[in-house]
Amino acid sequence: MFCYQCQETAKGTGCDVRGVCGKNEVVANLQDLLIYAAKGVSEVVVKGGVDISGIGEVNHQMLNSLFMTITNANFDEDAIEQQIRKMIGLRNELRASVTAEGMHDAATFEADTREAMLEKAAKVGVLATENEDVRSLREMIIYGLKGMAAYTEHAYNIGKQNNEIYSFTYEALAATLDDSLDANALVALTLKTGEHGVKAMALLDEANTSKYGHPEITSVNIGVRNNPAILISGHDLTDLEQLLEQTKGTGVDVYTHSEMLPAHYYPAFKKYDNFVGNYGNAWWKQVTEFDSFNGAILFTTNCIVPPKSEEVRGRIFTTGSAGYPGCNHIIAGADGKKDFSAVISLAKTLPSPKEIETGSIVGGFAHNQVVALADKVVDAVKSGAIKKFFVMAGCDGRMKSRDYYTEFAKSLPEDTVILTAGCAKYRYNKLPLGDIGGIPRVLDAGQCNDSYSLAMIALTLKDVFGLDDINKLPIAYNIAWYEQKAVIVLLALLSLGVKNIHLGPTLPGFLSPNVAKVLVEKFGIAGVGTVEDDVKLFMLN
Ligand code: FSO
Ligand code: SF4
């Protein structure tokens, strides 16, 4: 196996024996083959000139395939094998309907057995591309597409689609098979990936807000009640909605976990009186927090950490693109509805959660809410009460070096405001950082995809201040990344013209030295240094 798609990759260069995430060699290799099959489908669509408006199932399975390979989403080898078969089947049907010739091997290979799949996988993984710069760019594009697929799938679940995103996904995946494309062409494609990332986030924003209302300032309870409970993790709001509907009146409480926290900010979920609050912190703390939660757990997406005990594993359910061997997986029926009765029944037999903290946290500062406060914010900037904003969106992770972000937040001058989104927020959202004239010093826009809101806020401020360049705003970007959704967020920001983004806690292992150089020279991308130096540097510029 070889995988270097996330920030925690072994030695910063690549996992080649077992993933630091817990992914074993078989899962890693099957995921490689699934991506190869997805490239094959793309080749047929592009070379065959297939009209994508007529292949709804293929479009959907493409999203699902990419999503299943995101870090910590799916560890279930059987599920991945089944998805490979599905993609090969769909690819063959499509190929039979077109007349194009000279198809790439990805569009024609067959692998009927697990053995044949693993044999093929060994030849088509990341290292099959020999030139390290081409490999770096191809992989960066693929990781961006994975993140984009995740956001597009959530929008799809709400019934919103954008064919431009599907078309681009096929075009870009097929391009990663094309040896005639040099590094320059791939750099251009990388930026185009970012442009489509903006479209995917806009689509999801529209889907979420049209169905559930605009996020609004909300205080979220972080304590517990004395009832049996379900903890819902991941990012999918339609799963949450169905769970809340099905638990209504059952005596079972529902808590959010990690990236599901921002669901509390949406008006539509406030009517459920069993929707109690948020339990715990960022994804990686589940290794202890699932023990004390006691109840049933539902993963709607990543981030799953392989459970240490059978007891915890027995309480975990997965759905959508998520999966873990031995955990009950809930699939949607023909009508798209999911039956969560098994989760609810199990929850009823389990003790209530153990309290690990008390109090509340405040969030809900997505674009609509912040724009509603625009006068206040603009006045605070004009009067000098707010000197600078820090976009600190992205992910949290296990590495000790991420303490940097807590220390950085603590060390920022009191006339600065943090704009956050994604699970990175857990590094500082419970610190007593206070407010500036009623504006909290940590404004949480929501999930990682709600980084879109942060970009919208920046564009609004640019107009209000009459600036011609987004980089002239008093906004600094100090972003933490972990998995591929953060890659699409980064590419999206670059495509919007944002420069001088600091990325940590380490730069991606998938960046070759030459590709890293392009990012530094063209976009001013930098890593992080010490807290003291960085705060000084950011406040000077
Ligand atoms: Fe975090 Fe995991 Fe949302 Fe990621 S929970 S790390 S960027 O999946 O997707 O922020
Ligand atoms: Fe390693 Fe990350 Fe890949 Fe897991 S997802 S195998 S930790 S690089």
Image (cartoon, rainbow, N blue to C red):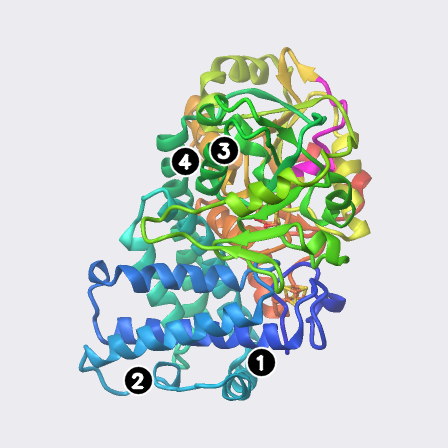
Indicate which disc, 4 or 2, sits on the residue closer to the N terminus.
Answer: 2
Instruction: Say which mark, if any, is on residue 127.
Output: 1
**The C terminus lies in which quarter of the figure?**
top right
- State whether residue 501 appears in this view: no
Pick the front one: 409 or 104: 104
Q: CA distance from mark 2 to mark 3?
A: 48 Å
Indicate which disc, 3 or 4, sits on the residue closer to the N terminus.
Answer: 4
Q: Which residue is mark 2?
A: 103
What secondary structure is marked by label 2?
loop
Q: CA distance from mark 2 to mark 1?
A: 22 Å
Pick the front one: 313 or 263: 313
Indicate which disc, 2 or 3, sits on the residue closer to the N terminus.
Answer: 2
Q: Position of residue 516 (x, y in %)?
A: 61, 63
**Residue at 53% over, 87% down:** 123
Q: CA distance from mark 1 to mark 4?
A: 38 Å
Q: Amino acid at mark 2?
A: Met
The residue mark sitting in front, 1 or 4, is 4
What secondary structure is marked by label 3?
helix
Q: Amino acid at mark 3?
A: Leu
Q: CA distance from mark 4 to mark 2?
A: 39 Å
Q: Which residue is mark 4?
A: 208
Q: Give the magenta range.
A: 425-434
| Residue 319 falls within the magenta-colored stretch | no
Tell me the quarter of the picture where residue 466 sits: top left
Instruction: Say which mark, if any, is on residue 244.
Output: 3
